[in-house]
């Protein structure tokens, strides 16, 4: 199995390298003070440091269920399994469907592809367009597989937000054929215009909806969740018990305390969306100015801008860029066939304005050679 190239890049970065590679949030936007207060409270009760239940502490599952209920997607705490990041959620689901066929977007999230490979799943790819997956091709492939992995909200790597029509078409296809979709939604709260209804909410019995606090609060908490029907949640909990007994109790209690004030969390999300929209505009303006050869779609949310440098093999190019102390992720990493690609995924949430201008100038110098 291919080692994650993104990990390799992240490990090779020194203090002088400007990185547009990882999907890292902006550290200055972590609500440190509020998390510190929430954390102090955890240590007031030694029971909070004890072993806890495998599916996650009840008050946190209640709060997560409420996120869904507020949007009209009826959910009980028993529909929620708390996981160690959504990455673990993906692993648990893949174990549940070990060796089965699965339809995935092309390009797709490398972290999921590696999990599917490790669980001997047979992946069938369907091209992802700028408004979502090609639905006719999707449904043809889904009829056989009856299982699909999709990231409809600001996809990683492409940043695509599926249109409402495509969401409806996919839900209809699942309703007609049975089976399940895995809807991975770590970026769903990071919208700049509007949040669209999840596909899972249209097919509650036939879906796994994955959420995470990594992109909205802090990734090192390592807390995510799966929303699915109760029977499946029970089966997934048994798989989880073989991995880690339960996700970190301290992190769960910190989050539970923090989320007690739901209006404060809403305010934080609102601030985050505004700040990331501004960072996206800074990045895309700089792209037009410093790297005008790069052709891209304007992101509507999330953390990435994706596009092409026509005529370049961006995998070869990234090694030259590394020498000049700037990195990005070449898109061949996101295609199963490892094709030569002229596409790039840039992360725009992590770097400062100065780093963005300087980093893109460095890339421009490399391509001019
Ligand atoms: C699409 C997608 N799914 C899942 C994850 C894993 O996130 P976490 O385990 O931090 O919740 C990521 C991380 O970047 C991602 O981009």
Image (cartoon, rainbow, N blue to C red):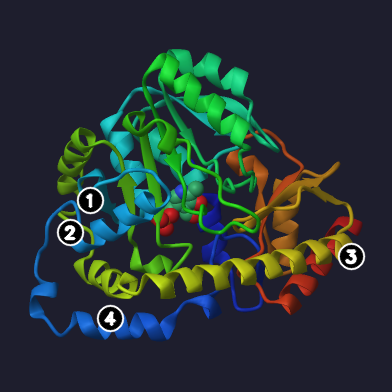
Mark 3 vs mark 1, CA separation in Å: 49 Å
Looking at the picture, tell me which residue is in the foreground, 71 or 135.
Answer: 71
Task: Give the image quarter of residue 119.
Answer: top left
- Residue 77: mark in rendering: 1
Marks 1,2: beta carbons within 8 A: yes
Q: Which quarter of the image is occupied by the N terminus? A: top left
**Real-space CA distance between mark 4 and mark 3, rounded to the nearest whole angstrom:** 44 Å
Check disc 2 and report the residue beneath it: 58
The span from disc 4 to disc 2 (Cα, nearest Å) is 18 Å
Q: Which residue is mark 3?
A: 289
Which of the image's four quarters has the C terminus?
A: bottom right
**Viewer-proximal residue, 250 or 270?**
270
Q: Measure the C-alpha gap from mark 1 to mark 2.
A: 7 Å
Q: Secondary structure at mark 1?
A: helix
Mark 4 nearby-residue class (10 Å; few <14, some 14–19, many ≥20): many
Identify which residue is drawn at 70% across, 64% down: 280
In the image, residue 194 sits, relative to residue 238, either above or below, namely below
Can residue 17 be seen at all in this image of the molecule? Answer: yes
- Check contact, mark 4 vs mark 2: CB within 8 A: no
Give the SS element for disc 4: helix
Q: Which mark is residue 39?
A: 4
């Amino acid at each position: 199995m291919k080692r994650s190239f993104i990990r390799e890049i992240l490990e090779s970065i020194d203090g002088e390298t400007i990185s547009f590679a990882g999907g890292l949030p902006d550290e200055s936007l972590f609500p440190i003070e509020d998390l510190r207060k929430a954390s102090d409270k955890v240590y007031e009760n030694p029971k909070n440091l004890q072993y806890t239940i495998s599916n996650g502490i009840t008050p946190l599952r209640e709060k997560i269920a409420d996120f869904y209920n507020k949007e009209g997607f009826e959910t009980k705490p028993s529909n929620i399994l708390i996981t160690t990041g959504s990455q673990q959620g993906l692993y648990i689901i893949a174990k549940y469907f070990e060796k089965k066929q699965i339809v995935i977007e092309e390009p797709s999230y490398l972290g999921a592809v590696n999990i599917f490979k490790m669980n001997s799943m047979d992946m069938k790819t369907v091209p992802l367009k700028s408004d979502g997956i090609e639905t006719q091709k999707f449904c043809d492939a889904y009829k056989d597989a009856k299982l699909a992995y999709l990231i409809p909200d600001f996809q990683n790597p492409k940043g695509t937000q599926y249109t409402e029509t495509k969401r409806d078409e996919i839900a209809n296809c699942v309703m007609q054929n049975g089976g399940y979709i895995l809807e991975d939604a770590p970026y769903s709260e990071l919208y700049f215009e509007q949040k669209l209804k999840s596909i899972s909410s249209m097919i509650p019995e036939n879906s796994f909806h994955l959420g995470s606090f990594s992109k909205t609060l802090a990734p090192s908490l390592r807390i995510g969740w799966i929303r699915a029907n109760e029977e499946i949640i029970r089966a997934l909990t048994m798989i989880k018990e073989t991995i880690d007994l339960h996700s970190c109790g301290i992190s769960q209690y910190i989050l539970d305390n923090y989320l007690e004030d739901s209006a404060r969390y809403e305010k934080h999300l609102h601030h985050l969306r505004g700040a990331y929209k501004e960072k996206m505009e800074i990045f895309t303006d700089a792209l037009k100015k410093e790297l005008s050869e790069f052709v891209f779609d304007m992101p509507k949310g999330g953390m990435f801008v994706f596009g092409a440098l026509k005529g370049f093999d961006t995998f070869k190019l990234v090694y030259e860029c590394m020498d000049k102390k700037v990195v990005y992720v070449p898109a061949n990493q996101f295609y199963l066939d490892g094709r030569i690609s002229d596409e790039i995924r840039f992360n725009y949430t992590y770097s400062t304005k100065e780093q963005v201008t300087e980093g893109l100038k460095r890339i421009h110098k490399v391509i001019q050679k």
